Amino acid sequence: MKLVNLGENHSLLNSYIAGIRDKVVQKDRMRFRTNLHRIGEIFAYEISKTLDYSTKDVRTPLGTAAVDTFDNKVVIASILRAGLPLHEGMLSFFENADNAFLAAYRKYDAADKFHINTEYCTSPELSGKTLILADTLVATGSSIMLAYERLVEDGGEPDYTHIVCPIVSADAVVALKKALPSKATLWTAGIDEELTSHCFVVPGLGDAGDLAFGEKV
């Protein structure tokens, strides 16, 4: 698996990453969602540079123009709820992409230990396509790994997989490198070194789902 950290480069992306981390800015849910939407657009643009292109003739009112456009069939998948604003940002660029959605969440036991529970999943055929799987904050990598396995089980194995995680822990990077196929790229903008005993990322950004859509019961 290849790793690309866009946060290492000076760009406007870092301003939006700062916005989703900032506890004052986070109080404005619409701004939080908008920042994630913008981040999704930037990741989509960067991923578009890696796709396969060919030249097509486009008829204009005055003649014909030769334009290079990508040939890949793209599927965007996100983990509910936190991945939705990110998903919408990428979909605004890959406007004709198919879409997949999964529900994955932590389920705690009496000893305060947790496992990742996956339930709802809807996916198109993935075989021969380019899969973009997105989640806003990744702590252990377990949700991404289980989501990928479920998507492949339901839709077949994609030709190539892009994992989009704006904030990811260093532990998750190691785990994903071991678990994901070689034909995959992990895209991030921030790798956080600390993971608490309860598997919370520090400095992280908090619960992205709650910040975007309100606290759950």
Image (spheres, helix red, strand yellow):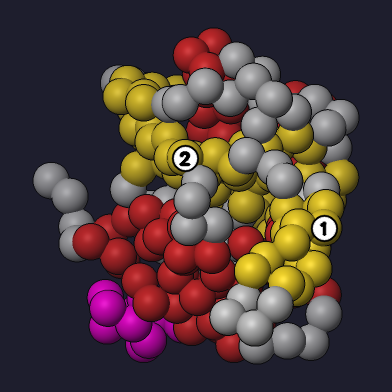
Q: Is residue 205 above or below residue 180?
A: below
153 vs 147: above or below: above
As for residue 85 lying within the magenta part, the answer is no
Q: Position of residue 95 (x, y in %)?
A: 48, 58
Please identify the quadrant where the N terminus is shown. Answer: top right
- Identify residue type, mark 2: Asp
Residue lying farthest to the left in this orientation:
217
Q: Taking 130 as reference, is 77 left or right?
A: left
Which range is magenta? 22-32
Judge left or right: residue 204 versus residue 163: left
Q: Is residue 154 above or below residue 182?
A: above
Front in this rendered view, residue 182 or 75: 75
Question: Which of the pair 3/101 is nearer the observer?
Answer: 101
Q: Quadrant of residue 161?
A: top right
Per the picture, the main secondary structure of the magenta-coloured stretch is helix
Question: Disc 1 vs disc 2: which is toward the camera?
Answer: 1
Q: Residues within 10 Å of mark 1 (few under 14, many from 20)?
A: few
Q: Nearer the viewer, residue 70 or 123?
A: 70
Q: Is residue 192 visible?
A: no
Spot occupied by residue 164 in the image (x, y as percentages of width and height) = 62, 52
Under tag 2, what secondary structure? strand
Residue 29 colored magenta? yes
Mark 1 highlights which residue? Answer: 55
Note whether residue 184 is visible: yes
Rendered residue at 54%/65% (across/down): 93
Q: Which residue is mark 2?
A: 98
Percent position of residue 212, x then y: 30, 65
Q: Quadrant of residue 16?
A: bottom right
Q: Would residue 195 appear left or right of 24 to someone viewing this image?
A: right
